[in-house]
Image: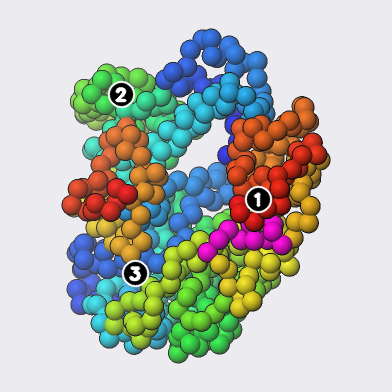
Amino acid sequence: MKVPDNFLYYLSAHADCNARLLARAKELTAQDLEVLPNADAKRLRKMVFEVLGETHRMKAFVRLKPLGGAILHGYLKPRHKIAERVCDHFARRNPRTIIVLGNGLESWISLFYEGRILCEHGAGLTETLEQLESVLRDFGMQGSNECEREAKEKDRKNEWKEGKDAESIWKAYYDSQYCPDRKNLRVFRQRMPRRDQESAGLRLLESKENVTLEDFF
Amino acid sequence: MVTLEKIAHLASDCRFDSLGPDAQMDSEKLSMLGGGTRHDVCASTFSPRSPGLPGICHSFTQDGRCVSLFKTLYTNYCSHQCNYCTNAANCSQKTRAFTYTPQELAGITLSLYQGNYIEGLFLSSGSGRNEDVVMEKIVETARLLREKHAFAGYIHLKVLPGASRSHIQEAMELADRVSINLEASSPAHMNEMSATKNYETDIIQRQRYIRDLMSKTDRKASLPAGQTTQLVVGAGAESDMEIFKRILYEYREIGVKRAYYSAFSPQRGTPFESRAPQQKWREHRLYQMDWLYRIYHFQPQEIHHAFDENGFLGNADPKMAIARQSMDSPADPNVASYSELLRIPGIGPRSAQRIIALRKMHPIKGKTELAQMGVRIKRAAPFLKINGWRDSTLLMWSA
């Protein structure tokens, strides 16, 4: 992967980015960052890829749970300032559904509706969800919110959702995909770093009974 | 249009499982039919349609392989007699037969997609009693997803050996990618592995159908992610050279996007149960060979340098073997062309591009600079000459 043209955007989202660094980066092009063999360029390049990497993995690892018919919510506590972008990604993937991502401290809300992204930054996840639910309830009684009405209708149509818990389906399926004769925990840890799993509220394996002493060597 | 009557009718036509038409979503079925595709390697979800789909790996199993699709069999009932497969009719320790209905599959796919567990569906299957009936169900599932539920995710459908041209076309109109597994590299090796599949008519001919349908101008079966294929490696005695020849044919004549290699591992109850498992490194070396041809654009005659006299790749980097035999003199990174740079071990497409971009700014002074650009100096040094200086030829053999 190459350094993207809008690398300044990613650089500024980095947790360790500051005004001085950004000013220095502004003098460079994406091409400079890509090829210059000095420590400075290398460091900036690394920072850009750290942000890109975390964004990509959050899009992959965050799991969404339905709440009523209109909301999908998930846990997200990223190291870099990427939550809004991730939230928008999920909103585009699930048009006309309110996406809420967040943790105990803050949350991000996005809705993709009629080709536009509406987004909002809120307090803790639970609090935001409660607020949203109560707002939706009020609208539902008045029957004035078109978006919610459609979402409800969509929910009714989706008979398949009833009684089928995605998490348990997933568990049974995920376990079936493992080939024990190919066991390779080193690659697993490399592809699913614990740090990123934690940011997405994911806890895949690392169950100690599956790990033998061999795996540490 | 799909009517409920049609679905119900087809479902009762094709009910091999003992659970009956109102089968509950049981985890045994999920894991049996999911496990049936464990050896299918393709997990790509990138599709250059509009708007394009990204390649995202949502999780990895403990074997380090990506799980990005709900990859499952439609049914594990199969009338073929493939000597390596646990679902084959001639396997003595077969498990119970399970079958999904298109509705069940569409439902699972949608709920997993919504929960962001997967990017889409990968649907393969045993042949059932009749592959046409199963193909119809596979197409039915994709149609339910696309037309009834407006599913925008990725769909990869397997074409069953011997499927009809019209079913293939229907599958192609709905899927991002279709594939049919070669399994063997030649008709003779196929006969050794399966008594019921005809290599030429059941498999190669179907690949040609896919190729021809893709090139039709109406673009209805445009198949954005193309067709792929997979081989079982090490079940028979086929050499890597034979595999390479077959793959060349696949890339040049059939136009497959890419090939996958799956190392044979003996399964209980199958006729091949007592055969030795294939070492996993062979897969890795075959992929390296594949990359040299497909990504690095090495000529086939260059790649031949990597095979030993029996036509096998050793457990070493084939690019290094090729470089030792074909690079007569070391290359100067300040003047070498892109394709010359690519032929140096330790330099890949990205570092080659960087070298070319950097030397436009200023000449490359030494190995440290190359290392900063991602060149693996230890491997590359014996083949490099920077400003007239080079490491000794001896190093070339110890690298």
Label 3 element class: loop
Q: CA distance from mark 3 to mark 1?
A: 48 Å
- Name the image quarter holding residue B304: bottom right
Dot 1: what SS? helix
**Circle 2: residue type:** Ser
Query: Magenta segment: does it hold A50?
Result: no
Residue bearing mark 1: B395
Q: Amino acid at mark 3?
A: Gly
**Residue A50 seen from this side:** yes
Foreground mark, 2 or 1, reads 1
Write down the chain letter for disc 1: B
Residue at left offset 39%, top offset 78%:
B276
Residue under label 2: A107
x%, y% of residue A180?
30, 62
Residue B274 position, x and y percent, is: 34, 83
Residue that label 3 marks: B36
Q: Position of residue B17 (x, y in %)?
A: 24, 76
Q: Comparing marks 3 and 2, which lies closer to the viewer?
A: 3
Same chain shared by disc 2 and disc 1:
no
Identify which residue, B376 or B64, lies in the foreground.
Answer: B376
Label 3 crowd bin: few (<14), some (14–19), many (20+), radius 10 Å? many
Q: Hey, what amino acid is under mark 1?
A: Leu
* Count of marks overlaid on the render: 3
Q: Residue B135: image x %, image y %?
A: 44, 74
Query: Horizontally, is B23 left or right of B138 in the view?
Result: left
Q: What secondary structure is marked by label 2?
A: strand
Query: On what subunit does the disc labeled 3 rest?
Result: B
- Disc 3 with disc 1 on a shared chain: yes
Pointer 2 chain: A
**Lateral position of residue B294 relative to residue B154, left or right:** right
Q: Which span is picked out in magenta?
A: B315-325
